[in-house]
Structures are given as C-alpha cells and as structure tokens.
Amino acid sequence: MRRETNTSRAKTSIVVLVAGLLALSVVAGAVALAAGGTTVSITPADDSVDVGQSTTFTVVVDNADGGVGAAEVGIAVDDTSVATITDVTVLGSGSTAVDIAEDGSSADVEYAFRDTADTGTVNIVEVTVEGQADGETGLSLEAAEGNDGVLVFDEQGTPYDVTGTNGATLTVGSGPATPTPEPATPTPEPATPTPEPATPTPEPATPTPEPATPTPEPATPTPEPATPTPEPATPTPEPEPAPETTLRLDPSSANVQPGQTTTYEIVVDSADGGVGAAEIGIAVDDTSVATITEATVLGSGDEEVDIAEDGSRVDIDYAFRDTMNSGSFPILEVTVEGQSIGDTSLSIVATEGNDEVLLFDEGGTGYDVTGTAGATLSVQSGGGATPTPEPATPTPEPATPTPEPATPTPEPATPTPEPATPTPEPATPTPEPATPTPTPAPAAANFEVSNLQAPGSITQGDLIDVSATVENTGGQTATKSVEFRVDTDNDGSIADESAVLSRDVELAPGESKTFSFEDVDTSGLPVGTLTHGVATPDDSATARITVEAPEPKAPAYFQFDLVEGEVIEQLDPDEGDTYHKQDRFIMALIISEDEQQRGGAGTPMHRTYQAEGCEVTYSWLSFDNTTGQSQVAVSVADAGGCEGITLSYAGYELPDGATGWDADRAEEQELKDSITVTLNPGEEEVLTVDVTPEEPGTPNTPGQLIGHPAGGL
C-alpha cells in the first residue's frame, strides 16, 4: 500500500509555511501582492515510447520574474492503461514533498526554499512516465490535493497569477523510444497553446481566497501546543539559546513646535545574522501633546503598517528584509507631530496580539529581546536648546614684567696668583716589561648560502622542494642552524622572519653540503608574489615565488530522508532498495553544505503521515551548515489501533557533482549518519543526524608551511 504524505496548509499555500514566522496580508479574498502573470507547461508537448520504456517530461514556468522559490502542482495521466507516472524529481535543493498515486495516475508535488533562475522560462519539476500498453494518452497540470489551482511563488514568497496551463501527449507503441530533448534554454510555449485533445481549464488568477476581512494575526505567532505534550522516554536535547539584543529609539530626546514633525529611528543594538523580520509596536503616552503620523520600514520586502486613528500607536510587521549582518543599525523610522505644548514619552511595545516584541534574523531564528529603551518629546512654543556661550574676554596678560636687578654682581678685584715654581718631572722613566707577540686565532666559522633552488610559480596547496648549498668559509668547525623562511609581512626580507623548517648542521672549515626541504605544503601561503629563502646566522639566499589561487571546489550536497522503518545503508533502485519503491518514504531535504535551512526542534509541526494505525506529525527538516547537523521533530498519535511505529532519519552525501537525486548514481550515495527510534502513541522525539566531515589536520596560518628536511645533513 502506498503511504500518503499530507500537508497542513496555513493560509492555503506552502509559502506561508516557508515564511514560517511571517503572516502576509490578504485583502478581500485575494493575495495582496502578485509576482505577475505566467503560464505553466509540460514539455515536450508530444513524445513517444515503447511499452515498458520510460520518458521524462519537464514542468516549466513559462514567464518567471523573481525566480520560482516554491510551488504546489499536480500532474495527471488521463489513461493509466496506456502509461503511468513512476518518478518525480524537484530540480534544485530545498524542502520537498512528493506524493505519487498508487496506480500511477497522478502525482502531487510541493516544494520550497528553491534558488532558481530569476527570469524567463524556469524548469521546476521532472516527471518520469512509463509506457504500459499501445495507445495515446494526455498529461495535464492540475491543482494539488486541497488547492483550487496550480500555485507557484517567486523566491520572496509572492504568488504568481497562473493564467493557464499547457499539457502534453504521450504515444505508446512499438519501436525505439524518442528521447526527451534537453534544450540549453527551454523554448517558451506560445501564449495560446496548441489545442490538445482536451482543452486545459485555465487556473484561476488568484489562488485559494482568504476570508474578505481576515482577523489580523501576528507575523510570527509563538506556537503553543493544544494539549500538553508528554515527556518522551529519551529527553529532547535542549536547543541552543537565541541570540540576545536590545532595541532603542534614537534620538532619546527631541524638541518640536506645535504643527511640526520629527523622526525617530528604531535601532537594533546587537544583531548577529541581520534582522530579516520583526513585529514591533511604538506608542505615544499623551496624544494631546503629540501623535504618530507615519512609519517607514527601511529596505525592501513585505510589510504591514497599522497606525491607530488617534495616532497613539503604530504596529509594524515586516519580512524578507536584507539588512546589515551584525552590529548596531536602524530598521524602522517613525514620524511624530507636535499637537500642543507639553512633554510626552514614546515607548517600544508588543504589537496587538503578541506578548512581547519579536525580532528574527535573516534565517528566521528569533532573537531574545532583553530590553527596550524609549524616548521623550518636548513640544515647545519655539526655539531649541541654547548653546553654551564662549567666554567674551580672554584672560589678561600681566601688566608689568618682572624687573631686572639694578646692579650687577661685582667681579673680584684681584685674580688668584699662579704658583711661582712648576713641579719637576722625574729624571728617569720606569721601563715597560717586554711583551711577546701572540699567535693569531683561526677565523670564526662562517656559513654562507648559495645555489638556492625552488619553483618560481605554484598553485596554493602544491607540495614543493627547496634546496640550497651551505659552505663553512671560516677557520673553525661549528654547528649552526639552517632554516627555511617565508616573508609573511611582505617587506621583501626574511631576516626578521621565524623559521618554518629548521635543522642543525655541523661543517668543518671549507666543507659544503646541499640541504633540501622536500614536500613543503604551501596551503598556508597567501595568494600573490612573496619572498622566501634559506638562511643561516651568517648569510641567506632568497628568491621570489608566485602563489596562484586554486580552482574553487564545488560544495558537497546532502540528502536527509525521514522514513518509516529501518535505514537502507546502500541504496540500489535496480534491486528495489529505495524508500520510494518500498513505500516507506515520508519527507526529504536536499541541500548544499554552505546553505542553511531552518526547522527542526522548536518549530511548528504541520505535516502528517499515517501507517499501521499511527499518525506521525513532523516539522520541516532543518540543516545548520555551521555544525553539519540536521533535525526533524516527530510525534505519534493513535489513528486507530496504533501499537507503535518505527521511524528513521538518515543523512547521505550525494556523489561528486550531483545536486539532486539521481537514480542512476544512487549506489554512490554515502550514508553519513542515521538514527532509528520506535515511538508509541503520545510520544515525541527530535531526530538529529550529523554529516560533518572527518576532522582535518590543524589548518595552516598564512605564511606557515608544513614539510620535512631531507638531504645530506
């Protein structure tokens, strides 16, 4: 029996789940903003295969403007006796839910968090169809289960107006299959599609309508469980604490006259990861003194500003902002108008329906707002603060200089007389003792360096050999160090540098040897041209080497599978060893090592899966590229005779160069980590796997090399 994966829809679309923490405004049953009109087509429009063979069709958004970050679409085969759907692949990485009907007649596809081409035709889904018997059947696009139409959204979560869909025709008969062409740039379908055997019903311009006047919800409600969740047998790991920050109004005080306005900024004091979304209220204590007249969200994105009729407060909800990543910066501006003379204060408050001010980083993680600082406004009759005056008169100089003495000190009248008779010299000098001539000592040892050999150009990370000849030109035998050095401060000299590699060597007078450093690792060298060389305490020889940057390495991709039952260590579609073929697949996430995906512990659980009388509710799959960990929160309820269910969460690394599921290379996927649990009704668990690569060696710092000395010393 094929298991069914269901989606709980908030606001009727997956994008509201994608936004997660944000409630986008809906007006009069229609979406407030639209990304533009487009059609959605199946290409190629006509294809043929033999019985038992397969071909692939592509679902194409014909006129994108802002990418296709999320979609909910169904694909249907008109006649399953002629052909059936066997596989569906969402192109790119992100969160995916695929439900193929047991008889192969249809497939529902939901995906989010995709980074696609921004404009023109965008391929979003590939559908594999297998011929069953001679004949002809049509393929069509339809609304996914629970929707009223095909839903596609740009990468900011804004829905497109799907003005129509174009299907395809498959002919099954004897003879070789006609391969699906892979155009470099898909040719857009004409505005008026070629008539098919059945004319496709155009999708409504506006997806599932909301009520005409929706009750305002906070942009990110804090999910409270309806029923207290029992403690699991194994304690749920504590999530990392949210980053802390404070908010303030700037300036902290201002003066205006009645009828004039002034503007305050709302400043985040300590951001870490930007401030992509927020729900903030600003209130004026005394509206007889001043009122709020305008509020502006800085930057571009979705926003909702609600100013009270009496100007006493404003509630601001916004999302999808690209702000500064760290430090202190403003996110909002509020304009206040003076009404009458007096003083009032402004404060930062929770928006209506919330208990506290809410801030989120650009990945959707909430901040812990530990405090807010308001401001004051003084409405005066005129003028501002008076500056402190400069002193009018400088300090006067003294009027009378200090007088010189009137009479100089007299010189002595009579000089001191010289002695009349000089002291006599001795008649005969004392003779010096005779000194023998000393024997000169031999000259000190002097280690000179010559014949430096090294490559002139390398790629960063290459292993190189460096050698030089060292000769003792002095007159004494000595032991001295021979060192390999690199000019890390780029002053053109190695005299002030520390040794990268060193070894003591003994040389007799006139003796010389060649000293080599082999397999020197240059990973730590900066890109550019720098000086290096071999040095002794007496001499050195240097050369210049150019370090070129290596080709960038493509990021690795990982696949995380939430499944029923045990983990498959070695996937093999030919042997039926995949979760889809065994009807155990629940949810998957494919993502690159340098991307982030929020979800996991602490996030709402919207989606369900039923099997063996048990209903499994689970959250979006998460991935933290700073730790290599992925999480999914699951809970089990009794749906009728549930005696417990076994669930597994597995993390695989995709083959080199692969960015998505490839059945032909499935055997190359490497299982990095997995966890298997059995849960009874009423139990919940956070499943965590770690795909962090093995710890590498200590990274080199710029200018540091790794190698070993070799040669004849």
Image: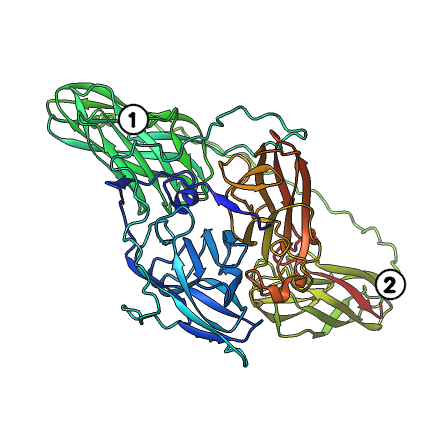
SS label for mark 2:
loop
Q: Earlier in the sequence, mark 2 or mark 1?
A: 1
Please identify the quarter of the rendering in which residue 418 is found: top right
SS label for mark 1:
loop
Identify which amino acid the numbered label 2 is placed on: Thr
Q: Name the residue at 25% across, 37% down.
A: 212
What distance separates the C-alpha of mark 2 from that of mark 1? 71 Å
Spot occupied by residue 79 in the image (x, y as percentages of width and height)? 46, 64
User: Horizontally, is 44 left or right of 254 in the view?
Assistant: right
Identify which amino acid the numbered label 1 is placed on: Pro
Residue 392 visible to the viewer: no
Please identify the quarter of the rendering in which residue 665 is found: bottom right
Rendered position, 270 above or below 107:
above
* Count of numbered labels shown in the rendering: 2
Rendered position, 393 above or below 273:
above
Q: Nearer the viewer, residue 140 or 298?
A: 140
Residue ID for mark 2: 437
Q: Nearer the viewer, residue 214 or 582?
A: 582
Residue ID for mark 1: 403
Rendered position, 494 above or below 392:
below
Q: Quadrant of the C terminus?
A: bottom right
Q: Name the residue at 68% across, 46% down.
A: 674
Q: Name the residue at 51% across, 60% down.
A: 89
Q: Name the residue at 48% across, 26% down.
A: 226
Spot occupied by residue 61 in the image (x, y as percentages of width and height)? 37, 62
Spot occupied by residue 220 in the image (x, y as percentages of width and height)? 40, 34
User: Horizontally, is 319 left or right of 636 in the view?
Assistant: left
Q: Residues within 10 Å of mark 1 (few under 14, many from 20)?
A: few
